[in-house]
Image: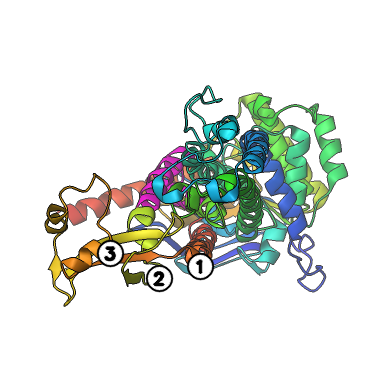
């Protein structure tokens, strides 16, 4: 009774790997609820940005139609609403979307100045909530013992989940980020803000999508390491937030050696100014207090002019990242985040391969 | 021909060996019971056989293929303890998931089998009874048309009636498909009604193996149950003696 049961190895059709399309369907079936949640969140934010952005663009068109270009906001002096008196309502309407000016048309605290800060949380949360359960739920519920013993094998299954989800999330984040860039574009054009401040840098270009991808990859990795969904999400959010803060505070400004100049320094608010200091013409440092005491009668916040400094044989120095490097900075940060994400995804698959249970 | 061949097989978890120097053969074409107390290495052995974990030492082959390889995975269907399945899916989607995770799949067979068992396709897996869930897991395993069916403690969570039904299902499938089945259990009672062949594990090594008839004949007509119990008792006493020896 024993001999007949097993065909010899030659008789058997050679085993074939399960096609990726079928594994992707499984990934879709397992994660469609999470993806629907993500779509709902992004859709709601997107709808808000689209509608408000449209209003802002209309207000901006009315403002630019009324106020001649030469009389618009002078960035260095803050939000000065120049122009003919008749244009005041149009100017006020436009700037109120930025939460500035009297008689704001916005009732809530949500405006083009606060929204970018709130959006900074989206990549972290989105990546964590989609990435957390991808493999950890399988491990904590014990269903990995079902899944990993099917014909498809665990390595292919893990890859077939991680890669499509990563691509979809990143693409969605790119879309929202593009919408935000359009939404905020009028204020950038109007010279209200540059694009280096963290809340704009992080929501525009490739940064928003890169952080979303990184968050997803890190949380999926943490899920396999901790084998629990919720602790993995929590740990990942803490680590991501810390890393985000360190990047913003200490890392980002060093992506390129800063430009150091003396004299009037960079103009406008589009550059990332890292510091300014004083020296004598022979290069000996002069403290800021000494300089300010010498010009004690200057109003607060007004820096001494180059001519005034020249009388004392002093020079003012500036170190800054010029606006022209913005895309270079975006791609640098996007690049290392992408590399780190790919490593984490590969590490996650490797962990599943080495330590399935 | 043997459906599982282990040679010098060992698995270490940290410092502790879950299975050590295990050499055994599981004959093809019958239902084999892997018997032993908790912690004797049954689950470790089965996990190695289905490719869930890799051996620290030795080799294990399944139906002639290296355990865990693509070919071996294709030929081995595993029902883990408590039959883990996706609780939130309807039975229909659970089948579809399984179908998409395997090249070999017999959908008609799965559907007709569930129909015969009265398990509705639109029911959520989480809402099934323990017996139904075990049957669904078995249905999925059989729909894969395996040459080897591996079941880890399949009877532990079932009530007596469901247990009898389940055993009948496995025996029928093994006979109808001419496949082999291996199941682990720590319950010794009524084993001869379930298994044709028995392997007794104690502390990570094989204590006894043979058909139920062979075991009975070799031990002066004792029932398999008695034979197993005395082997396990002897093994436990031996362990105790060793431990005391070390202590002294």
Residue A193 in the figure: left or right of residue B65: left
Q: What is the spatial separation of the Cα atoms under label 3 and label 1, in whole angstroms?
A: 31 Å
Residue where numbered disc 3 is placed: A306
Name the N-terminal-most of marks 1 and 2: 2
- Both on one chain, marks 1 and 2? yes
> Magenta part of the protein: which range?
A219-245
Residue where numbered disc 2 is placed: A256
The residue under the point 48% across, 48% down is A193
Q: Which structural element holds mark 3?
A: helix
Determine if residue A126 is in view.
Answer: yes
Q: How many marks?
A: 3
Determine if residue B213 is in view.
Answer: no
Name the N-terminal-most of marks 2 and 3: 2
Query: Where's residue B107, x and y in %?
Result: 84, 45
The residue under the point 35% across, 58% down is B14
Chain bearing mark 1: A
Residues under numbered marks 1 and 2 in contact, where contact means CB atoms less than 8 Å apart: yes
Pick whichever, B165 or A173, lies toward us: A173
Chain bearing mark 2: A
Q: Residues within 10 Å of mark 3 (few under 14, many from 20)?
A: some
Name the N-terminal-most of marks 3 and 1: 3
Q: Which structural element holds mark 2?
A: loop
- Both on one chain, marks 2 and 3? yes
Q: What is the spatial separation of the Cα atoms under label 2 and label 3, in whole angstroms?
A: 27 Å
- The tag on residue A328 is 1
Query: Where's residue B209, x and y in %?
Result: 55, 55
Query: Where's residue A120, x and y in %?
Result: 48, 44
The residue under the point 76% across, 50% down is B100
- The chief SS type of the magenta part is helix
Q: Residues within 10 Å of mark 2 (few under 14, many from 20)?
A: few
Q: Is residue B77 magenta?
A: no
Query: Where's residue A110, x and y in %?
Result: 51, 30
């Amino acid at each position: 009774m024993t001999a007949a049961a097993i065909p010899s190895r030659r008789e058997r059709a050679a085993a074939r790997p399960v096609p990726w399309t079928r594994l992707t369907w499984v990934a879709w079936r397992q994660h469609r609820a999470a993806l629907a949640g993500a779509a709902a969140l992004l859709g709601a934010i997107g709808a808000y940005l689209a509608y408000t952005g449209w209003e802002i663009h209309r207000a901006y068109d009315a403002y630019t139609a009324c106020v001649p270009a030469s009389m618009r906001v002078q960035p260095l002096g803050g939000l000065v609403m120049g122009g003919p008196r008749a244009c005041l309502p149009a100017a006020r309407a436009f700037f109120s979307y930025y939460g500035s000016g009297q008689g704001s048309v916005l009732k809530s605290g949500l405006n083009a100045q606060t929204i970018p800060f709130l959006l900074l949380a989206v990549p972290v949360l989105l990546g964590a909530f989609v990435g957390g359960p991808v493999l950890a739920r399988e491990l904590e519920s014990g269903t990995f013992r079902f899944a990993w013993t099917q014909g498809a094998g665990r390595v292919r299954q893990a890859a077939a989940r991680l890669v499509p989800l990563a691509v979809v999330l990143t693409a969605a984040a790119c879309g929202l980020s593009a919408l935000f860039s359009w939404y905020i574009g009028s204020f950038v054009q109007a010279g209200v803000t540059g694009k280096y401040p963290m809340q704009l840098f992080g929501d525009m270009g490739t940064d928003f999508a890169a952080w979303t991808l990184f968050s997803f990859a890190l949380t999926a990795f943490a899920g396999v390491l901790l084998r629990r969904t919720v602790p993995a999400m929590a740990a990942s959010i803490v680590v991501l937030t810390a890393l985000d803060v360190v990047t913003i505070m200490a890392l980002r400004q060093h992506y390129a050696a800063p430009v150091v100049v003396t004299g009037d320094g960079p103009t406008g608010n589009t550059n990332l100014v890292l510091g300014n200091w004083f020296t004598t013409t022979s290069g000996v440092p002069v403290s800021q207090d000494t300089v300010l005491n010498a010009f004690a009668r200057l109003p607060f916040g007004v820096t001494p002019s180059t001519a005034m400094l020249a009388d004392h044989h002093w020079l003012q120095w500036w170190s800054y990242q010029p606006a022209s490097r913005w895309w270079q900075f975006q791609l640098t940060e996007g690049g290392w985040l992408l590399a780190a994400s790919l490593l984490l995804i590969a590490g996650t698959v490797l962990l599943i391969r080495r330590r399935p249970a | 021909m043997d459906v599982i061949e282990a040679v010098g097989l060992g698995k270490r978890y940290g410092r502790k060996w879950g299975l050590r120097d295990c050499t055994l053969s599981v004959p093809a074409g019958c239902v084999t019971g892997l018997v032993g107390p908790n912690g004797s290495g049954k689950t470790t052995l089965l996990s190695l056989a289905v490719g869930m974990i890799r051996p620290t030492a030795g080799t294990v082959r399944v139906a002639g293929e290296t355990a865990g390889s693509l070919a071996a995975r294709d030929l081995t269907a595993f029902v883990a303890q408590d039959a883990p399945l996706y609780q939130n899916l309807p039975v229909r989607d659970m089948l579809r998931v399984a179908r998409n995770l395997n090249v070999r799949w017999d959908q008609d067979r799965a559907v007709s089998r569930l129909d015969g068992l009265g398990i509705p396709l639109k029911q959520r897996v989480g809402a099934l009874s323990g017996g139904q869930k075990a049957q669904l897991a078995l249905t999925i395993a059989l729909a894969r048309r395996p040459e080897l069916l591996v079941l880890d403690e399949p009877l532990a969570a079932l009530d007596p009636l469901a247990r009898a039904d389940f055993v009948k299902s496995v025996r029928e499938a093994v006979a109808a498909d001419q496949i082999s089945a291996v199941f682990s259990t720590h319950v010794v009672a009524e084993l001869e009604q379930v298994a044709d062949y028995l392997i007794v594990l104690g502390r990570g090594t094989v204590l006894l193996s043979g058909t139920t008839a062979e075991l009975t004949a070799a031990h002066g007509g004792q029932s398999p149950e008695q034979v197993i119990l005395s082997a396990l008792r002897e093994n436990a006493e031996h362990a105790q003696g060793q431990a005391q020896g070390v202590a002294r």
